[in-house]
Each structure stands twice: as C-alpha cells, then as structure tokens.
Image (spheres, coloured by chain):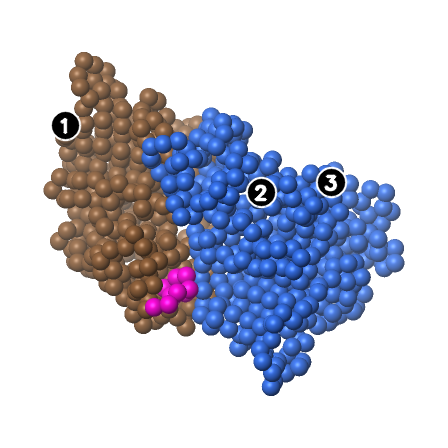
Chain colours: A brown, B blue
Amino acid sequence: MTKILIIGAGRSTVSLIDYLLKNSSTYDWKITVADVDIKLAQEKVIGQPNGEAISFDIKNEEKRRAIIAEHDFIISMLPAFMHGDVARDCVEFGKHMATASYVSADMLALDKEAKRKNIILLNECGLDPGIDHASAMKVIDEIKHQGGEIISFKSYCGGLVAPESNDNPWGYKFSWNPRNVIIAGQGTAQYLLNGELKFTPYNRLFTQHDVIEMEGYGKFDAYANRDSIGYIEVYGLSNIKTMVRGTLRQHGYCKAWNVFVKLGLTDDSSKITHTNKLTFSSLLASFLPPAKGDLKTRLKSFMANDWDSEIEHQLEYLELFSDKKIEMAEGTPAQLLQSLLEEKWKLKSNDKDMIVMQHEFEYSLPGKNNQKLNSSLVVIGKDQNHTGMALTVGMPLAITVKNFLTKQFNLNGVQIPTKKEIYLPLLKELEENNIIFSEKIVS
Amino acid sequence: MTKILIIGAGRSTVSLIDYLLKNSSTYDWKITVADVDIKLAQEKVIGQPNGEAISFDIKNEEKRRAIIAEHDFIISMLPAFMHGDVARDCVEFGKHMATASYVSADMLALDKEAKRKNIILLNECGLDPGIDHASAMKVIDEIKHQGGEIISFKSYCGGLVAPESNDNPWGYKFSWNPRNVIIAGQGTAQYLLNGELKFTPYNRLFTQHDVIEMEGYGKFDAYANRDSIGYIEVYGLSNIKTMVRGTLRQHGYCKAWNVFVKLGLTDDSSKITHTNKLTFSSLLASFLPPAKGDLKTRLKSFMANDWDSEIEHQLEYLELFSDKKIEMAEGTPAQLLQSLLEEKWKLKSNDKDMIVMQHEFEYSLPGKNNQKLNSSLVVIGKDQNHTGMALTVGMPLAITVKNFLTKQFNLNGVQIPTKKEIYLPLLKELEENNIIFSEKIVS
C-alpha cells in the first residue's frame, strides 16, 4: 500500500483529491488529506474508504515531521512560500513530493540531495505553470523534430468567468485565491522581445499590456508574467527572438486595474489603520493628490489620458464612488481592495468559471516561409465548487503523481513537466478528460 | 559593574561607542562590542581598557542567548528587522534594551511582559526617529503650557552632504546604509493634510514632494515618510489638522530620482540574472517601453513632462547613458542601481556630511493670531568616519542609556523619547555637544 499525503484542502484541490480517491482501490493507495481546517479536509474524503482527513498546522514542526515521515508521497497544496519546510522534511526522510507551484530557490537547493536519495521533487505541475509547459513542449519538440526552429513563443493563460456567467463589466470573478489576484504582477516582469531583453516594472505593467484574439472567444488583455527569460533554456530555445509568458484578462480589464495601481490601492506592504472610519469614496479621495472638485472629476483629471467611460462604469459597479463603509478596522490598501472585490467578484453557486490558454508560435522550417501556429485551450467549469480552475490545477498533478507511482516514468531531483516521458502520457490522459488543445496554423 | 552589550559595529556606531567608552570608568561600565565582522568591532575598542570586541552572528541562537544573558543592557544597532530575536531574549532574561529604530510589531508585542519584569525597551532613540521626537515634544509641550494648540506640524530630516563637500549634481553622498537610500519610501506614505487623511503610494512619492526653505541653506525637496498619522496620538495632538513627517534631499533630487522609480530601477523584489552581460545603457533600454530612436531620446519621450536638462545632467553624471559594464552577475534592479551609486556617491575621506532637520509648527495662542515657528538643526560631520550621521544617531542613544542607567528617569516597557524626563536632559546634553536647535517665529 502506498500512502499519499495531500497538505492543504482549499478550493484548488477538489479535482486532485477526487482523482486520487477514484483510483485508490486500483493502485492500493491510502489518501490522507491534511488541513488546518479539519472540516475542509473532511468534506473532501467523506464516504471514501481509502480517504482520511486530519488536522494539520504546518507551523507545528514536530507534528509536521511525524506525519510526513509516515507517508510515501507528499503533495503540497499550501501557498508557495510554505513548500520549503515540507520539501526539506521530504528530502530528509526520503519521501517524494509534488506541487503546482513555481520552483523556488528553497526547492532548487534540495535538487542534489534529492537525486542522491533517488526521490522526485515534482513542481510546476498544475495549470500555469503546468499544463502550459506540457502542451508547449509537445509543439516545440514536434517542430524541432521536423528540423524547424522557434523564432517567437508567446504563452498566455487566465482563469476567468465563462461567458454565460459573466454579469459584471470587469469580466472577472474569483476562481482561486483572491489575494493572488490583487497583488498579481508585483515585481519586475522579464521577457525577450525581438531579440531585446525587456523589463517591465509593476507601475507600468497594466498600461504596456498586449491584446490577443482567441477564435470564438474574442479579445483578451495579456500582461507579462514574472520571469519568462529563465524558460528559454528550460524549453531548449537558445536562438529564440521573442519569449513572453503572460496572464489573460477580459479585454478592458487592464486599463481599469491600472487605476488601482496608479492610485496605490494594490500596495500590500504597509498597513493603514482606523479604516473602519472610512468609506470607499473617502479612501479614494485620500489616495488622490490634493485638488478641488468632486471625487469623480478629481479621479478623471488624475488619470488624464488613461481614463474612459468604460473604466468609469467598471469603478461604479464596485461602488467606489459611494458611501459604502469599509468594514475592516485596519489593513494594507491591497487587503481593503480585496475585501470589496471578494464581495463584487464572487463566483455564485451556479456560476461557471473558464480557463483560457493560448500559445502563439512563430517558427521556420527548412525551405519554407515562416509559419505561425496557435495552440489553444478552453475549459469551462461545472459550478462554484467544481471549477475549471480546480480541474486544470488538480488533474495534471494527480495524473503525473499516478504516472510516477505506476512507473510510467523514472526521474529524480527537481522536475517540471517539460520532458517527453512526463508530458506525453499527461496530455493524453488530459484529453480523455476533455482538457484538449486545438492547434491551428494561423498564417 | 554594569555590562553593556552593543550588537553591530557599522558606520553609525562610532559616536555611540566612543561616548560609552569615554564614560565607562566614571560609571563603572564594561562595554562589549559584537559584530559578525570581528575586525569592525575591534577597531571600535582598540586601546580601551573597559572595551572588548567579540565575534557574533545573530543567527547563532545559542550563542546569541548566552551573550545576552551575561549582560545588563543591550543596544542593538542591527538592521531593524533583526531586533525581534534580540528583544525576545532580552525580555526572557530580564535585560534592558535600546535601539535607534522604529518600534516594530515584534517590539510592541513585548511591552506588557517588559513592564511586568520592570525592564525598558527603548526605541526610536537615534536621529530620525529620535532627536526629532525630543526636539518636537519640547516645543509642543511649551506651546501647550502657554494654553496654545498646534494646528499644523511638519517635520523634515535628511542626511546629506555638506555644501563644502558637495561636488555632484545630486547633492547626495552616502553617510549610512546605501540600501536604505535606494529603497527609501517603498510602501504607502500616510499623513494628515488640512484635516484630510492622505495616502501617497511609492509610484508618486517623488512627484508629489514639497519644497522647503531653510535659512542659510537654501531649498530642499521633502517627501512624506512612512506613517505620520500614528504620531498624532503619540505626540498628544488630537485636534491637529496637518501632520507630516518627511525626508529631505537637496532641491532637484526628487524629480531625478523619479526617473528611477518610473523606469522600475528601484524594485527590490525580483532578481534579474546574467546582468554582467549588460551595460548600464542596455539596462536602461530594457526598462524603456519599445520605441525607435537613441536611448536619451527614448528616455526623454518616456518621461514627457517629468524631464528637464538638470535631470539629464544628473543622469549623465552617473554614466547611465554609457557603455559602463554592470559587474554584478545577478541582482534586483535596486541592487544593480546601488552598485552604481555606491561608486558615484561615495563619501571621500575628507568629505563632510550634513544633517538637516526642520520642524515647522503652526499654532494658536489664546487671544492672539496664529503663529508660525520653525525649529531647525544643522550638524556638519568631521570626515568620512566621524560623520554627522554617526554623531546624531549615536549620541542620543548613548546619552539616554546613560541617563537611564544613572537613574535620571525611571520607565519600563516600550518607550520612545517623547516624555519630558527623557527629552529634557537629552536635549541639554546634546546642546553641550553642539547639537543645537535654533527656534524662530517665522510670521
């Protein structure tokens, strides 16, 4: 019997846990789901003979180590910054581990020791990062196999709301951790554009965005995401001229979000106090430079050319010009904004979310004109709980863990799903589960 | 014999250690200076019978606790984020502690236990925070004593370069930790202006600055500093309409620094790699939005109305448009910028730094017109090592520790120098050491 431990039972774990429980009898697995909130864990395993829920606080070092030591494979669904402690324990006790998060410096530091002990530290195995790597590498390897060379690679992904559930002017509802949406993009985005390194700081990220088109779904805003340059080597694209990974939002979102960035409402580094004495309109006024006139006039004049009537409508929808009271007694500007957006952008019980991913390749083939190819994925969720987000984050992780445990591939150390032996069976099984890319030559 | 431990022997500690050693025989003190770099500690106590240097790594918990346990009063000159561990040890072992840093949440959490054990956790006892509190409270208490009420309080401070050593167009050289200068102001500045709460985010901090005048020294730029609102209660100014604490730079500095902020060169949250393949001009180009034309033309067009020939001169002085190579292999944009500025803004051996502080009060007195009063301080350093910065950070801390140990005041828990029994003898002894405020009714 193989004992699998899943740490964290939040909203992205539904499909992961379902898949593992469904396959548990076939493969003789015991599945333990651990969360600080035992109820959250219990909900996920109710009525499942091979499932068990336990209460688990990552900060309790002694208990953490004891529990990790008695399992064989640990899947951490905790926030990314918490993986380090789990990973160190896993390596110490010789346990395999998987996450859907980016490879951190903490994780990378364990690579050598993990290899020595022949254990795998599988990362970036969710949606983005995850499915994007697998599906992109399939196209890249195919083009290379034909003797071609990739000139440009742009890869975009977004967790949005399905058209049939889209009833707000932002085209956005929360299908995952709201906090990550509010602070998305903070830092410096790094990418390669026409052979030149480009660094875009947060303060300009939402004004320097691209607009892409996706067949059947219209236009989307795309802003650059973290460090794309590091993936040039990972993907084996040393001669590439353009390499951009980006985040998608509905067209029109970025220019409105830019108002929050420019005002300072997304800062998450300093706390404002006594905020329950404020309304959202007085908060807005406090962030505006001193000026005469009513609030909306001041904001228009402050935003100057970065303002239009659509933005005004989006902000009005959030009741930002109203006397709506702030409930929180204190918080960072980002936390105050989050408290408002959690109410306004809530995924209702029958709402469906939508995952959109598009890779745009430009490449040369021997003796031919340059080609353009788009590889696109759309996944619509079922409802508030069975979201496309939970499905596309959880399935690749579950499938890859299963493929590893059933010896369909044999790797150790820090891995991400860019190798053929990982991505081929993964993409095949995703297709069987209706997570299907369509590839199309576009010119 | 009283055993005093000073943790950290960096450039701000010279005057602190000198003062304590000079008084050590009189008061029967033994002074231990501890630093990771034992040489730095040894330099500070050489030839001093009551002084001892030890090697000390704050991360070595066992040794840290052992050393703290065998002293009576601990002065932490470590970077602010490291005070927490020291403070917890001090409270556990019943040792008094002092710092020149802002009261942190960590420190505040220890207040109750420190009071119970009758030990003092003295903070904000350097220059700014420190001398500013003492000198401001003296004026505030005097006005209140006359039955007056403060309407507006603006307090500015800067560590600059003395006019006679000012040979660069920024009017700035480093007299303290360069890193803190590069990332200064990140977060949200909070203050009160004409009765309205004002929040200024980092992205606008250097465009929304004030310009102040200081008799005999000309104009200075002043940008708002951290959270001024919290001091309304601390200073007992509940009816005040304007409350701003700010940082001073030479006039013209802020609009040039704004170029770095707008470009994204002060971001300290994400690392750029392979930077030793870049020059400073290619780094600049990578941060600019894609556009045609030479670098300077692109930058001018990017900065639009926030550009003038003076800024151009300031950036040219830094060789930012040149093929000067970046030496660091990787780093955050802020670290790359710091590497350049440390070379360009170095305080040379005979250079003198200059501390400038000015409080601007507006107040009412019964039956009189509103009054304006400025309280100003200028301190010129001796040389590269005996800086005005080290003097004004170290002296108030040393004097207040001496006054506490000699029972000139008796307080416990978390304290800052706003109480009469602390600030009166402190300001008196600072005056004897030529740190003298001049007060002047200005209208």
- Camera-near label (3 vs 2) is 2
Residue A415 at x, y = what percent? 37, 31
- Camera-near label (3 vs 1) is 3
The kind of residue on which mark 2 rests is: Pro
Density class for disc 1 (Cα within 10 Å; few <14, some 14-19, many ≥20) is few
* Label 2 secondary element: loop
The kind of residue on which mark 3 rests is: Asn
- Residue B188 marker: none
Q: Residue at x 63, y 83 (%)?
A: B147
Query: On the rendered image, what quadrant is the C terminus of chain A found in?
Result: top left
Location of residue B219 by image quarter: bottom right
Alpha-carbon span between mark 1 and mark 2 = 54 Å
Q: Is residue A287 magenta?
A: yes
Residue matched to label 2: B169
Q: Residue at x 26, y 20 (%)?
A: A149
* Frontmost residue, B408 versus A409: B408
- Camera-near label (1 vs 2) is 2
Q: Are marks 3 and 2 on the same chain?
A: yes
The kind of residue on which mark 1 rests is: Ser
What's the magenta region?
Answer: A283-293
Residue B322 at x, y = what percent? 50, 29
- Residue B350 marker: 3
Q: Residue at x 45, y 33 (%)?
A: B283
